[in-house]
Amino acid sequence: MVVANVVMSRFPAGLQAALRSSTGNAALYAAKEMLRQNDITLAEQALRMALQLQPKGDELHLLLADTFDRVGKYSSAAALLESLLKNERIAARVGYLRARVLLHSGEFDEARTTYGNAQQHRQHWVRIEPTCVNRGYEV
């Protein structure tokens, strides 16, 4: 919890209170804000704190994998993404991010294949649920 206190000390008092009483949404917001400010270390800490509050949060896992990719922790990002591939609803987003991680780690052929699979998942999902693009499921 020492890390959480250090992380929270960087946030405004109102956000600190929200983080302490949150189910993870405030921590997700804080992590996104830290990423926007390019404070990757603090974003990773906020995401880990959010995952303690909401361990099954797919959006949190995706954002953490993206954060790992940004700092060159490709194997950590790949492991997280591998566990998310089972969720059909976010498979396209996972695939696109996984392709980027593979590309950054030098696995070009696998990245190309993964990107193609992500495209297929996205097209399949749009056919099943045409309004998904308007509801925020767009990749």
Image (tube, grey):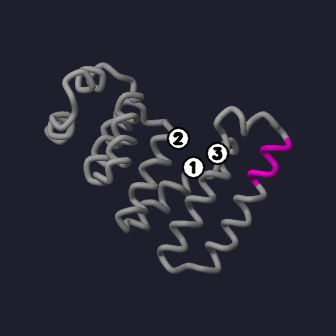
Q: Residue at x 30, y 37 (%)?
A: 49
Question: Looking at the magenta stretch, what is its main secondary structure?
Answer: helix
The three-letter code of the residue at mark 2 reads Asp
Q: Position of residue 139 (x, y in %)?
A: 64, 49
Residue positioned 49% across, 36% down in the render: 57
The residue that label 2 is drawn on is 58
Residue at point 32%, 45% (across, down) = 34
Q: CA distance from mark 1 to mark 2?
A: 7 Å
Q: Which residues are magenta?
A: 121-127
Asked which quadrant contains residue 108, the reply is: bottom right
Q: Are marks 3 and 1 in contact (CB under 8 Å)?
A: yes
Q: Taking 79 as reference, is 6 left or right?
A: left
* Of the two numbered discs 3 and 1 in the rendering, the one whose residue sits closer to the viewer: 3
Query: Which is more N-terminal, label 1 or label 3?
Result: 1
Q: Quadrant of the N terminus?
A: top left
Residue 22 image offset from top left, x and y in percent: 35, 22
Q: Which image quadrant is residue 99 in?
A: bottom right
In the image, residue 124 above or below residue 46 = below
Residue under circle 1?
84
Q: Which residue is mark 3?
A: 90
Q: Earlier in the sequence, mark 3 or mark 2?
A: 2
Badges 1 and 2: C-beta atoms under 8 Å apart? yes
The residue located at (43%, 67%) in the rendering is 74
Q: Is residue 124 part of the magenta span, yes or no?
A: yes
